[in-house]
Image (spheres, grey):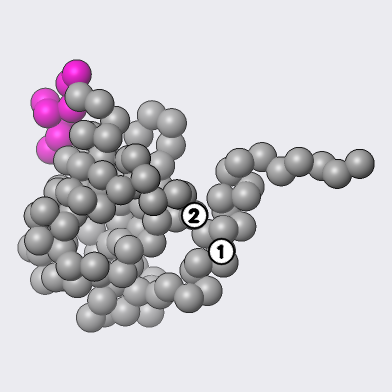
Amino acid sequence: MFKKRDRNEVRVIRHARVRKKISGTPEMPRLCVYRSNKYIYAQVIDDTKGITLVQASSLDAALKGQLEEVSKSEEAKLVGKLVAERAKQAGVNKVVFDRGGYVYTGRVAALAAGAREAGLEF
């Protein structure tokens, strides 16, 4: 009998396949998204040095007041705007978008839209 893989295991395999092609450089770092059932996280990563330049999540104190009675997609959009603002302060204007193996819809697409609205290019 075939053993069916769980959804997260398949996502991790998909993410590894994408990561073979996508890498962040100092000029164009990688905007990485992680989505749990409750929260969403975004990081701007320079893979050549192996460091996180900026990060934002729906747990951030900067967003605490704004997230009450807001849908998860709107939460993701606010996180995208916050990570883009922080990236601009760090001197990053262009990024490579890494959707983390998730389908580009819903909260992942909302985070990307928020980051684009705040001025990140990808």
Region rendered in magenta: 62-69
The residue that appears at 50% across and 67% down in the rendered structure is 18
Q: Secondary structure at mark 1?
A: helix
Q: Residue furthest top?
A: 69
Q: Are marks 2 and 1 in contact (CB under 8 Å)?
A: yes
Query: Is residue 72 visible to us here?
Result: yes
- Residue 67 inside the magenta-drawn segment: yes
Q: Position of residue 55 (x, y in %)?
A: 25, 53
Depicted 38 relative to depicted 1: above or below: above
Residue 101 is labelled as 2
Kind of residue indicated by mark 2: Gly
Q: Amino acid at mark 1?
A: Ala
User: Does label 2 or label 1 sit earlier along the sequence?
Assistant: 1
Task: Please tell me which residue lies in front, 50 or 66.
Answer: 66
Q: Is residue 119 above or below residue 49?
A: above
The residue at the point 35 percent across, 34 percent down is: 39
- Rendered view: 92 above or below 106: below
Q: What is the quadrant of the N terminus in the image?
A: top right
Q: Residue at x 38, y 29 (%)?
A: 38
Residue 56 in sight in this render:
no
Q: Is residue 50 left or right of residue 74?
A: right
Which residue is nearer to you in this view: 51 or 121?
121
Looking at the picture, how far across and down is residue 58, in whole percent? Answer: 26, 36
- Calculate the distance from the C-alpha at mark 2 to the C-alpha at mark 1: 8 Å
Check residue 114 for magenta coloring: no
| Residue annotated with mark 1 | 16
